[in-house]
Amino acid sequence: MPNIQVKIAFLKDEYLEDSELQEKTENLLQDIKQEVEVESAGLVAVNNSEKGAKDIGGFLLGVLTAEVKVANIKSLFRFLSDRLLGKIIEMEVTANGKTLKVKASSTVELNAAIKAAQEFVGE
């Protein structure tokens, strides 16, 4: 089975400056690289931007991606459920040529989004 692509976007918080949002994104990225066995992980370059997206330093503001083997997806989802509580996010999971997009703005929604993503990839 091919690797699973996960894209996480922090939605703009009215209390955060762009630079603070990007710092949160970069910190999460570093933590993912250190704590989860991923094939690759990085910020999303502007050339992959969606219409109307803001960028900072050549990367989309508040957006990162991770590519994970199926065997490691549970650990990524567990990590994300611990780290993203209380954050407003969009998550896009691509597996087997299909894509699931979910949004979460509360703990309940985040848990439901991660459960939906787990079911989507068959975990």
Image (cartoon, rainbow, N blue to C red):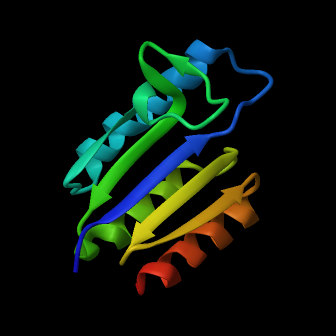
Relative to 21, say whether 115 is above or below. Answer: below
In the image, what residue occupies the spot 28% across and 50% down?
35
In the image, what residue occupies the spot 36% across and 60% down?
5
Answer with left or right where residue 41 lies relative to residue 118: left
Relative to 73, say whether 44 is above or below. Answer: above
Answer with left or right where residue 117 lies relative to residue 121: right
Res 12 → quadrant? top right
Q: Position of residue 26 (x, y in %)?
A: 41, 28
Q: Position of residue 119 (x, y in %)?
A: 51, 84
Q: Position of residue 71 (x, y in %)?
A: 24, 76
Q: Position of residue 79 (x, y in %)?
A: 42, 57
Q: In this view of the protein, can residue 81 be seen by the observer?
A: no
In the image, what residue occupies the spot 34% across and 69% down?
73
Relative to 63, say whether 69 is above or below. Answer: below
Please state the total of marks drawn on the protein image: 0
**43 or 71, nearer to the observer:** 43
Seen as rendered, the residue at the extreme right is 14
Question: Quadrant location of the N terminus?
Answer: bottom left
Question: Quadrant location of the C terminus?
Answer: bottom left
**66 or 110, nearer to the observer:** 66
